[in-house]
């Protein structure tokens, strides 16, 4: 008889308090506050985190953490990981929405022998990333892999 795997569910809380004009404070228990507001395109300040950036940042961060988790499970430890992400906000049928997010990770590895395994792991990241699974936007993952130079 096959044993059933117990899946857990989790809840996450965040609070937002309006402070002035088009800005407020995002907070969660035990964490640093983040000043948030409209982006400049919608009469906001350029030095304030906007919800659009937070959404794109969430996809980007989840992709990184998913890759690192899957890599660890396969015994792969990258030398470095950095990525940039870009979201496209469009007016679709009279409503603004992020229609696509492109994530461009650059993963540094110890040797050429790890390249194929890293590519295989990255191939599973989008399907396993729960943030990309939670939104309707098209997600594109365009990874680059490099072998880190040997320390002298």
Image (tube, rainbow, N blue to C red):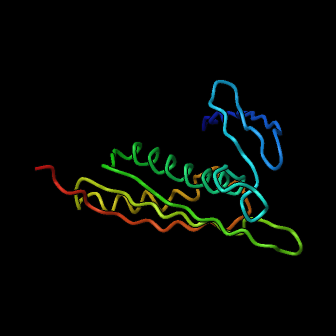
Closer to us: 4 or 146:
146
Q: Residue at x 30, y 49 (%)?
A: 79
Give the residue furthest to the bottom.
93
Give the residue furthest to the top.
30
Closer to us: 85 or 37:
37
Closer to us: 79 or 124:
79
Closer to us: 18 or 52:
18
Q: Residue at x 52, y 65 (%)?
A: 141
Vertically, is 150 above or below 3? below
Vertically, is 59 above or below 95? above
Say which quadrant the N terminus sits in: top right
Give the residue furthest to the right.
94
Residue 52: x, y in percent?
70, 57
Residue 13: x, y in percent?
75, 33
Vertically, is 121 above or below 138? above
All told, the count of numbered labels is 0
Residue 131: x, y in percent?
65, 51
* 67 sits left or right of 102 in the view: left
Q: Residue at x 64, y 65 (%)?
A: 87
Residue 19: x, y in percent?
81, 38
* 95 sits left or right of 15 in the view: right
């Amino acid at each position: 008889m096959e044993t059933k795997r117990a899946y857990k569910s989790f809840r996450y809380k965040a609070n937002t308090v309006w402070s002035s004009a088009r800005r407020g404070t995002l907070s969660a228990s035990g964490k640093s506050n983040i000043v948030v507001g409209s982006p400049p395109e919608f009469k906001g300040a350029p030095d304030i985190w906007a919800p659009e950036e937070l959404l794109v940042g969430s996809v980007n961060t989840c992709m990184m953490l998913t890759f690192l988790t899957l890599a660890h499970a396969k015994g792969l430890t990258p030398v470095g990981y950095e990525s940039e992400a870009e979201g496209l906000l469009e007016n679709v049928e009279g409503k603004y929405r992020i229609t696509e997010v492109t994530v461009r990770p650059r993963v540094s590895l110890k040797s050429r022998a790890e390249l194929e395994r890293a590519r295989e792991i990255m191939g599973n990241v989008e399907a396993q990333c729960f943030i990309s699974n939670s939104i309707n936007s098209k997600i594109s993952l365009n990874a680059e892999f490099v072998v880190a130079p040997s320390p002298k």
